Image (cartoon, rainbow, N blue to C red):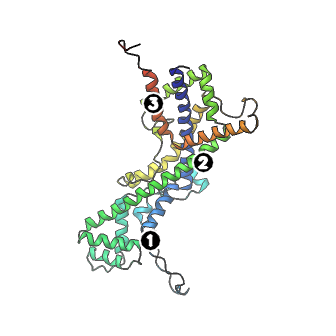
């Protein structure tokens, strides 16, 4: 086999990985919208940020007739209009109604978070106090815990400058959202791995079988390589919002890049995420189905022979699942590089080279 054959086979296999990864990412995005995964990760991180120490074990509980203690600070901040206004189901209306999706904010601008927190800290302070004193009063009344210690440190560091205090709160929140972003990315990759394995088994997407076909069938290899070249050109020419291309994928993490956006814009972007994912799912599924490579359970002839045959197929499925977990952008970048290598071809020998 020539160098060009190997490159074409690799190009075709990577193209399959790109399309299957887009399908898996679209499914993952729909699940994230239905389950409000971004909002749950962000809210959990915010609750951890604003937590207070739990009462010691065995501590006497207040009698039932006494009023309940005030809501935790995180819950009060989340209920503030500046935060609650960004809550969204992350689903199109025709889906959100039937599934009754949980409405949580997917993104909270750091400025809104700081303003809501300051408002909650000062609202029970005497009106005659200066604003800075009201904030200090609110911090002093907080239960002991990480939030109180952190806010005390910000007040001391600000030296009476309210803008400096607000900036410290924003930076504190952005750092927490960076950690939330890492948690979400890790969870999303695990989900992609699981979705990839399900797709590999249900649709019988066997990497080893596909690779063998592309290696030995010149017509299939040439057709898939040509489709890959056309796909690269199409995705390069289209805008980033084009369906069927990795660059059109919606944001996958509740990262701090959204903290400077306007809340309505962030909420609208989250609301549109599932609609874009459904379009991605349909477009990429059709592309996968059109490829002349062995996928699916129909017309594949007899099943694998014996234990070794099934083990071979299992390895092929696992390779597909692992490839999907790397994500469509990874494979698209690699696809472009291999395509460029194929276009350049091997470097010819110099004319004056020794024989």
Q: Tell which of 282 and 40 is nearer to you.
A: 40
Q: Marks 1 and 3, Cα distance to the nearest angstrom?
A: 47 Å
Query: Which comes sooner in the sequence, label 1 or label 3?
Result: 1
Q: Which residue is mark 3?
A: 336
Query: Which comes sooner in the sequence, label 2 or label 1?
Result: 1
Q: Give me the residue at 54% from left, 51% from top.
A: 32
**SS under mark 1:** loop
Q: In the picture provided, is 163 more to the left or to the right than 37? A: left
**SS under mark 2:** helix
Q: Quadrant of residue 138?
A: bottom left
Q: Marks 2 and 1, Cα distance to the nearest angstrom?
A: 33 Å
Q: Position of residue 198 (x, y in %)?
A: 64, 44
Q: Quadrant of the C terminus?
A: top left
Q: Give me the residue at 50% from left, 81% from top.
A: 56
Q: Give me the residue at 64% from left, 31% from top.
A: 209
Q: Which mark is residue 51?
A: 1
**SS under mark 3:** helix
Q: Are marks 2 and 1 in contact (CB under 8 Å)?
A: no
Q: Which residue is mark 2?
A: 194
Q: Marks 3 and 2, Cα distance to the nearest angstrom?
A: 26 Å
| Residue 222, visible in the rendered structure | yes
């Amino acid at each position: 086999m020539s160098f060009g054959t190997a490159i074409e086979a690799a190009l075709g296999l990577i193209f399959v990985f790109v399309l299957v990864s887009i399908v898996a990412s679209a499914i993952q995005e729909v699940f994230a919208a239905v389950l409000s995964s971004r909002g749950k990760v962000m809210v959990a991180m915010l609750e951890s940020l604003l937590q207070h120490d739990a009462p010691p074990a065995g501590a006497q509980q207040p009698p039932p007739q006494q009023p309940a203690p005030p809501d935790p600070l995180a819950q009060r901040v989340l209920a503030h209009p500046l935060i609650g206004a960004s809550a969204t189901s992350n689903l199109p209306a025709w889906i959100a109604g039937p599934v009754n999706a949980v409405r949580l904010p997917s993104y909270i601008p750091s400025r809104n978070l700081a303003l809501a927190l300051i408002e909650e800290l000062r609202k029970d302070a005497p009106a005659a106090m200066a604003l800075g004193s009201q904030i200090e009063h609110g911090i002093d009344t907080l239960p002991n815990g990480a939030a109180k210690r952190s806010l005390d440190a910000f007040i001391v560091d600000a030296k009476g400058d309210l803008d400096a205090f607000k900036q410290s709160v924003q930076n504190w929140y952005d750092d927490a959202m960076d950690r939330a972003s890492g948690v979400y990315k890790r969870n999303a990759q695990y989900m992609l791995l699981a979705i990839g394995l399900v797709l590999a088994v249900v649709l019988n997407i066997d990497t080893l079988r596909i690779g063998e076909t592309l290696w030995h069938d010149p017509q299939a290899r040439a057709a898939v390589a040509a489709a890959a070249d056309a796909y690269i050109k199409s995705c390069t020419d289209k805008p980033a919002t084009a369906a069927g291309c990795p660059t059109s994928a919606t944001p996958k993490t509740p990262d701090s890049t959204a903290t400077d956006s306007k809340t309505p814009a962030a909420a609208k972007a989250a609301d549109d995420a599932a609609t874009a994912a459904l379009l991605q799912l349909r477009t990429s599924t059709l592309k996968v189905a059109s490829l002349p490579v062995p996928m699916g359970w129909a017309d594949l002839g007899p099943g694998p022979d014996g234990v070794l045959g099934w083990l071979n197929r299992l390895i092929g499925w696992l390779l597909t699942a692992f490839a999907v977990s790397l994500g469509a952008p990874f494979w698209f970048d690699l696809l472009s590089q291999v395509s460029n290598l194929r276009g350049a071809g091997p470097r010819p020998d110099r004319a004056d080279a020794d024989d």
